[in-house]
Image: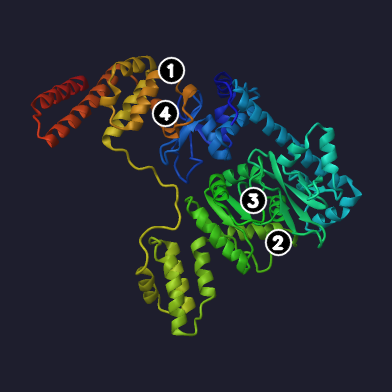
Amino acid sequence: MARYSDESRERVRDAVDFVELVGARTELRKAGVRRYVGLCPFHEERSPSFGIDPVEKLYHCFGCGEGGDVFKFVMETESLDFGAALEAVADRAGVELEREEEDPRSAERRTRRERLLALLERTAAFYVRVLWEAEEAAPARENLQARGLEEAALRQFRVGYAPSGWDRVLLASRRAGYSEEELRAAGLMTRSKEGRMYDAFRGRITFPLTDRRGRVLGFGARAMRDNQGPKYVNSRDGEVYRKGRQLFAVDLARVAASRVGSVVLAEGYTDVIALHQAGMQNAVGLMGTALTEDQAVELGQLARTVLLCLDADAAGQEAMVRAAGLVAARGNELRVVPLPAGADPADLVSSDGGGEAMRTLLDQAMPFARFQVERALGSAQIHSAEGRDAALAEVADIVGPMPPSVLREELVQLTAGRLRLSEALTATVLGMRGSAHGNGVRVEPRPALDRLDRTERSFLALCLATPDDGARRLARMDLEALFESPLTRRAAAFVRDHAASPASALPHDDPELAGLIAELVLRADDVEPSGATLDVEVLQLELARLDRGIEAARAEGAAVTALAGERQRVRDEIRHKLH
């Protein structure tokens, strides 16, 4: 990740309109001088528990606990890393970022990577020109149009055509100042046994494989003739491209996926392009490979709900089962799109009314557990008692671990009906297996804080509401002794040093702390600050410290008289200040 100066990062923070940025994701209403509230964009809720501070550019949800600054918001809603989020916000705000000084070796690595990326970009542009201008590419254009793909969509995805000549890219890149070594490192050249260099892709339709920021890392290429070898080939692994790391069209789908809360996973390049063309812009592709752990992570970061839109044949169903295991491990909700047998998304979209038909199928996506049960029952030998027992055992492995729910009840009824068994018997057998835990993970409400944690957070919020007084008090306090929670102890040290402008130094390498600081800033907007209130909160922290000391002394069999006396003195002082 590029290192940018703190000064330019702060110019970006100051320049961005945070209300406008967040308002594009959820409707906000003003709820105070320095607070806007709305429905949380990170979990489903009916009454607003989400708020932002438009001055500090911080957000926090008191329902699910999500929080952070403007850069974290863009990271979460647009599925970007910090560097990319900073660059995205800088582009919005029209602020030029300044790079920090680098050591020579890091600068050399960065320069080389930038050259390789630039080489891949110019090659992608060359392939696009060939597709639309070269006579040789006419069959490729006809092939794509026969699939129902329009020129505007193909240009959006930068679909191209690699000419059949042996050295077109090689010669053009040499003229532009690139070496053969760089061409090989970018995966654009290969060497024959005789030592001759030639273009890696020839006579094929090309699909750029990009990262989340749209930078070309490699290519997928589709053959045009039967004698060209494999139907699809990808760039070989190298310095820039790593097979199984990216999802096709992740750069074009990430914003839509975040907005609608779901991502559609299809198999082929043309499936994804067809879905986008029909308005389903949250679609990404597997690029013809089995889902990898890296891709599962990518899916999980794009949206909470993953819609598996893979072929309905046996191989496709097996692929769904394998993919499900990886995606479920990330805690995402899984649903399966019921494609008709023998049809893929591109076929459906190109048929009469295909766009609407495909949207209907997406709306009908079933929970993965139902797909598994349907699959088990579909292959069951229901005409014998042994066959029904075997099917029941297979379904029990799926339904048994599910907690009581409407879905579980529906699956029990479905199983009973298909196997011609009573619902009572079916429920009994299924209930004997598994344990009460679900197959997926939903965003849960944050756990309730204990009394001490609430006290510590209330005090820190007051410190932020009166930054000068709060910082002075924290500077005089023994944070190690007074703050029991390691997190609030770190937050106390942070507030002590940054009370006047907490957002300017928010730690991006400590998301837990950054989220708590955002919460405290929002809490500070709701309190009536006063020195007397701060006095009471300090005494409450001291009282908690003494309680811990008394408990520890009793555990060791030591005397507690002195500590008890001090505790009574603090309690009396609290009562005095409250009256």
Locate residue 93, reporting x and y percent. 63, 25
Comes first in the chain, label 1 or label 3: 3
C-alpha distance separating marks 1 and 3: 44 Å
Comes first in the chain, label 2 or label 3: 3
**Badge 1 density bin: few <14, some 14–19, many ≥20, Cα 10 Å:** some
Amino acid type of disc 2?
A: Leu
Locate residue 102, reporting x and y percent. 60, 23
Report the residue marked by disc 1.
500
Locate residue 138, reporting x and y percent. 88, 53
C-alpha distance separating marks 2 and 3: 15 Å
Locate residue 19, reporting x and y percent. 55, 29
Q: Quadrant of residue 174?
A: top right
Indicate the secondary structure of the residue bearing disc 1.
Answer: loop
Report the residue marked by disc 2.
348
Is residue 26 at all visible to an observer of this figure? no
Q: Quadrant of residue 9?
A: top right
Indicate the secondary structure of the residue bearing disc 2.
Answer: helix
Q: Nearer the viewer, residue 497 or 364?
A: 497
Comes first in the chain, label 3 or label 4: 3
State the residue lying farthest toward the front: 194
Indicate the secondary structure of the residue bearing disc 3.
Answer: strand
C-alpha distance separating marks 4 and 2: 49 Å
Comes first in the chain, label 4 or label 2: 2
Number of numbered tags placed on the structure image: 4
Q: Is residue 165 above or below residue 31?
A: below
Report the residue marked by disc 4.
517
